[in-house]
Each structure stands twice: as C-alpha cells, then as structure tokens.
Image (cartoon, rainbow, N blue to C red):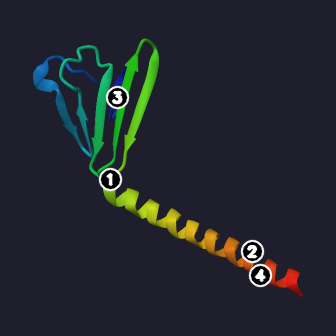
C-alpha cells in the first residue's frame, strides 16, 4: 500500500517514524507492522480513516467525531418521529372516514 501526502510518498523506515504529522492530518502505523499494511490517518476535524490490507483484501474503517454522530442521529430521529406521526395520523383519519 502506498501513502501519498502533498504529492510525495510517505514511508516508515524505523520505529521513530511511527507517527508523522502533516498539515491537517496525522499518520500513524501501529506497533508490530513492518510492511505498511495497516495505516491510521487522523484529521484535524476529528474524523479518521483506518486502512488495512491483508492477502490482497482492503479493509477501511471510517471514524467520525462524537458531535457529528449526534447531529446525524438527531436528524434521523426527528425524521423518524415525523414519519411515525404522519403514518399514525393517516391511519387514524382513515378509520374515521371508513366509519362515515
């Protein structure tokens, strides 16, 4: 796997280079990994990406900050409540009109 930052390749030659800081992003290679098959990128916004390769398969984990997750969940929860409310109202109104 190749890591490119500002149009330049990034390498981890020894243990002192496990954490490398760049403008807006911090790159980290976990201990015990020697072949750049597991890289973690943490951005200044709080988001992060973990990329792993194993036997030709690529795995990506995306991490979002807690405030972002709460904002998204609040949006979907409010939307869900509106949908439930409308469905219940349509069911109730339908029952009233059937009785007329």
> Label 2, label 4: how many angstroms apart (C-alpha)?
6 Å
Residue nearer the viewer, 54 or 23? 54
Please state the horizontal and vertical placement of residue 6, each as a whole percent of the image: 32, 35
Q: Tell me the mark number nearer the camera, choosing from 3 and 1.
A: 1
Q: Which structural element holds mark 4?
A: helix
State whether residue 81 is above or below residue 92.
above
Question: Crowding near pointer 2: few (<14 within 10 Å), some, many (20+)?
Answer: few
Q: Quadrant of the N terminus?
A: top left
Which x, y percent locates residue 62? 39, 40
- Going by the image, does 45 lie left or right of 80? left
Residue at image x 45%, y 60%? Answer: 72
Which residue is the site of mark 4? Answer: 93
Tell me: residue 19, above or below residue 45: above
Along the viewing direction, whichever of 24 and 98 lies nearer the viewer: 98
Look at the numbered disc 3 and give the secondary structure of its residue.
strand
Which of label 1 and label 4 is nearer to you?
4
Pointer 1: what residue?
65
> Which image quadrant for residue 50?
top left
- The residue that appears at 75% across and 74% down in the rendered structure is 91
Q: Is residue 85 above or below residue 55?
A: below
User: Badges 2 and 4: C-beta atoms under 8 Å apart?
Assistant: yes
Q: Position of residue 2 (x, y in %)?
A: 36, 21
Q: Is residue 84 left or right of residue 4?
A: right
Q: Residue at x 12, y 20 (%)?
A: 15
Q: Which residue is mark 2?
A: 91
How far apart are labels 3 and 1 at the CA level? 24 Å
Q: Which residue is mark 3?
A: 4
Residue drawn 25% across and 34% down?
27
Where residue 38 appears, x then y in whole percent? 31, 24
């Amino acid at each position: 796997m190749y890591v490119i930052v500002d149009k330049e390749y990034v390498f981890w030659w020894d243990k002192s280079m496990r954490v490398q800081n760049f403008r807006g992003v911090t790159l980290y290679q976990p201990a015990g990994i020697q072949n750049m098959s597991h890289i973690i990128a943490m951005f200044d916004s709080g988001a992060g990406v973990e990329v792993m390769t194993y036997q030709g398969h690529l795995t990506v984990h995306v991490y979002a900050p807690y405030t972002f997750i709460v904002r998204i969940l609040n949006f979907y929860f409010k939307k869900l409540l509106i949908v439930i409310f409308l469905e219940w109202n349509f069911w109730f109104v339908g029952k009233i009109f059937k009785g007329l």
